[in-house]
Amino acid sequence: MRGMIIVDGGGPAMHTPEHNSSLRFGPYVTPVVATGVIVECEARGLVTVVGLSKAPIPWPIGDRHGQHELIVFKALARAVRQESPEAVAAAWGVSLATAQQWKKVCRQPRPRKKQTLASPAIPWKPSEDELVGNLSLAEAARLTGRTLTAVRKRRRMLGLPDGRLATQRAARTHSLEQQAQAACSVLRSRTKVLSDSLSELRMTFARSKATLAFWHTMQGRSLPAVSQNTTWSG
């Protein structure tokens, strides 16, 4: 069987058998992520998107402390958990050792920052404050590994508005828009009914006017005949 050459950055090239390099699940779609966005990599933590790889499955590259590597998240994290390391290495263009290391990391539970009354306070980093200030409550909590309550308290300390009020305001605005659309729909339907009724009333008035004119004409024609008969009888 022929082999496939896989190159991982500056690492050595490796040969992978074809029967182990085929993906059994999927499809695995390249995510759309803008350059400069901070995302969470399951293998390295928070990274900054700096580009896109040229592998068979193009994938975002993240920078952390000057090291540029693929970001293990979304479809790649799912593939690492359910595909063989050989298949992941061939599809994403990394070495087998890197794919095996990803496999070990993704098998472990994702660490979260838990704090109790007895534990010391966990300091906030400038990168975390940036996430708190630019993202929603849920997204900031997910990327920083903190609770929603901790994110809300940090927003208040930074002098930022409460994310809950923004969510409620958005929901209230959406509700008002729905009510306005419903009121406009009812107004249009009732205006149509009123317009139809007015048209019928005009038609009825026109018929009544024509009928009245007809009887006036008939009455004017019958009067001379009656007077002539009266003269002859005298």
Image (cartoon, rainbow, N blue to C red):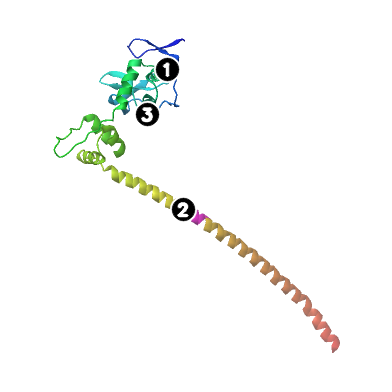
Q: Label 3 vs label 2: CA separation?
A: 40 Å
From this view, report whether residue 194 is shown above or below residue 15: below
Give the amino acid type for the residue marked by disc 2 in the picture: Ala
Residue in the image at 34% along x and 19% along y: 99
- Percent across and percent down for residue 94 are 36, 16
Q: Is residue 129 left or right of residue 193?
A: left
Q: Label 3 vs label 1: CA separation?
A: 22 Å
From this view, report whether residue 188 is shown above or below residue 48: below
Taking the view exactly as shown, the residue that stands out farthest to the right is 232
- Residue tagged 1: 20
Give the mark nearest the N terminus, 1 or 2: 1
- The image quadrant that residue 197 belongs to is bottom right
Secondary structure under the numbered disc 3 in the rendered image: helix
- Residue tagged 2: 182
- Residue tagged 3: 74
Give the amino acid type for the residue marked by disc 3 in the picture: Lys
Decide if residue 44 is in sight here.
yes
Which is nearer the eye, 70 or 168? 70
Q: Is residue 147 left or right of residue 100?
A: left
- Percent across and percent down for residue 200 are 62, 63
Secondary structure under the numbered disc 2 in the rendered image: helix
Secondary structure under the numbered disc 1 in the rendered image: helix
- Classify 10 Å Cα crowding around label 3: few (below 14), some (14-19), many (20 and above): some
Q: Which residues are magenta?
A: 183-188
Give the mark nearest the N terminus, 3 or 1: 1
